[in-house]
Amino acid sequence: MAALQGKVAVVTGGASGIGRASALLFARNGAKVVVADMSEVAGAEVVREIEQAGGTAFMQTLDVRSDENCAALVAATLARFGQLDIAFNNAGIFAAPTLTEDQGLALWQRMLDVNLTGVFNCMVHELRVMKERGGSIINTASIAGIQGAYGAAAYSASKHGVIGLTRSAALEYGKYGVRINALCPGLIETPMTVGPDSGFNDKMINAGVKGSALRRQGRPEEMAEMVLWLASDKSSYANGGQFVVDGGTTA
Ligand SMILES: NC(=O)c1ccc[n+]([C@@H]2O[C@H](COP(=O)([O-])OP(=O)(O)OC[C@H]3O[C@@H](n4cnc5c(N)ncnc54)[C@H](O)[C@@H]3O)[C@@H](O)[C@H]2O)c1
């Protein structure tokens, strides 16, 4: 039987990159999927891909900074699919590097609002449902959540925060059968790191590639495989962990 047969999963940031690859893999493994993203057009395209492959999905437009939007995500999931078993809280942003003194309060606030408060907002509503019959939550942190990131203090602080939130909630909700883990990707080839709007330049990519023992960037599909494992019952004793998938960068 497929690993996620009979399960319902929400994926924030599901329109692109790691979220998109995970939404597609979840659906291929039998889950009904809610693709949740700010980007409505790209999200609808992922839903179309899932449906064309014979899966079931719908798109929910949301801004994870909004508690109301996150409540509506969970409400819409229950209304359409009747249950919520898996939540991949993955939406996030990066910004062009600057020294800490030059990051500015606006950037600092935006990073924390999307990357950390966004995860918190989603979890609050997901946990209220999952407390009743268990579930698996995966929050996307980063290797920048377990070590410093030169030029990206706000980003790194937000990702360290995701890990603290993940570990604390894991302590609280394990007794309800809810497992909560953090994914810590290395440098992955997605619109966040590739292209003119990415915040990354060639120098940073080259340094990242050199820093990885495998001498390359990771692919979103390689993250999705870890996310699938964490979402499935195969990871039944994994809780409160940080799952580093970085080609050996932090080794
Ligand atoms: N790509 C990497 O190298 C890398 C490394 C470590 C961690 N990460 C993390 O992985 C996650 C996914 O990143 P990605 O590389 O797939 O990037 P991506 O830019 O391809 O995807 C991010 C998605 O999040 C959505 N999003 C952004 N802000 C949002 C908001 N406020 N509300 C709802 N949706 C929002 C975007 O529309 C986009 O679809 C992020 O949390 C990122 O920080 C990425």
Image (cartoon, helix red, strand yellow):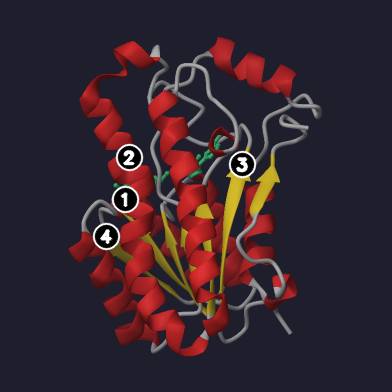
Checking the image for residue 61, the label placed there is 4
Q: Secondary structure at mark 1?
A: helix
* SS at mark 3 in the image: strand
On whether ligand 1 comes within 8 Å of the CB at mark 4, the answer is no
Amino acid at circle 2: Leu
User: Are dots 1 and 2 in contact, CB under 8 Å?
Assistant: yes
Rounded to the nearest angstrom, the CA distance separating label 4 from label 2 is: 20 Å
| Lower position in the chain sequence, tag 4 or tag 2 | 4
Q: Amino acid at mark 4?
A: Thr
Amino acid carrying label 1: it is Thr
Provide residue 140's location: percent of width, then percent of height. 51, 50
Which residue is at 54% across, 58% downward? 167
Dot 4, crowdedness within 10 Å: few (<14), some or many (≥20)? many
Q: Give me the C-alpha separation between circle 4 and circle 3.
A: 25 Å
Q: Is residue 241 in view?
A: yes
Pointer 3 residue Cβ closer than 8 Å to ligand 1: yes
Mark 4 vs mark 2: give the one in front: 2
Give how far across and how far down residue 175 sits, in percent: 56, 81
Per the model, the C-alpha gap separating discs 1 and 2 is 6 Å
- Residue 185 badge: 3
Task: Please tell me in which quarter of the rendered image ligand 1 is found.
Answer: top left
Badge 3 or badge 2: first in the primary sequence: 2
For label 1, the residue is 117
Assign the C terminus to one quadrant of the image. Answer: top right
Q: CA distance from mark 3 to mark 2?
A: 18 Å
